Amino acid sequence: MIIEPVDDISPCHALRRAVFIEEQGISEPEEWDDLDSGAIHLLAYEGQTPLGTARLIIAGTTGKIGRLCVAKSARGTGLGAALVTEACLRLKARGCSRAYLSAQTYAIPFYERLGFTAYGEDYDDAGIPHRDMEKPL
């Protein structure tokens, strides 16, 4: 399994379309925004098969991990945890001292196992309950 930043984000978009739009029913306008062009896109793949992605956005010493998704065929393999770990390493290497993300509430225990702490209130994002989480790097 390889996880690395990519310039060609079309495989990342294909994964996001499959997971967020097709599986979770998020609308196209809610998924596609103007932040992709300035972001770092991590792609996890085996051979030529894209299996997971995450989008990193850096603002000062804070990095946001977003659009994290794993193909249905690779769920339960530890790939999601590997993506989050790699994202945190890359953010720290770029000078970030804090990572944060917007977690779907069902996934809070997953992120807690990776050292994130939830804060604030639950809120709706694209019809799905979310809560913010953070981790010092």
Image: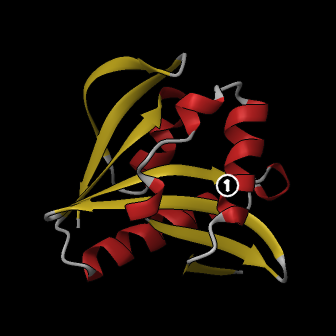
Residue 127, image x, y percentages: 55, 16
Q: Quadrant of residue 53?
A: bottom right
Residue 129, image x, y percentages: 48, 20
Looking at the image, can residue 66 be seen? yes
User: Quick check: 86 left or right of 81?
Assistant: left
Residue drawn at x 63%, y 74% as measured from the top left? 8
Q: Which residue is mark 1?
A: 13
Looking at the image, can residue 78 be seen? no
Residue drawn at x 72%, y 64% as measured from the top left? 11
Tell me: residue 61, above or below residue 16. below
Nearer to us in this view, 46 or 107: 46
Image quarter of the N terminus: bottom right
Q: Quadrant of residue 120?
A: top left
Tell me: residue 77, above or below residue 90. above
User: Quick check: 123 left or right of 19?
Assistant: left
Nearer to us in this view, 35 or 117: 35
Residue drawn at x 28%, y 82% as measured from the top left? 93
Image quarter of the C terminus: bottom left
Residue drawn at x 16%, y 67% as measured from the top left? 97
User: Quick check: 135 left or right of 10?
Assistant: left
Residue 77, image x, y percentages: 73, 62
Count of all numbered marks drawn on residues in the image? 1
Q: Residues within 10 Å of mark 1 (few under 14, many from 20)?
A: some
Name the image colouring.
secondary structure
SS state under label 1? helix
Identify the amino acid type marked 1.
Answer: His
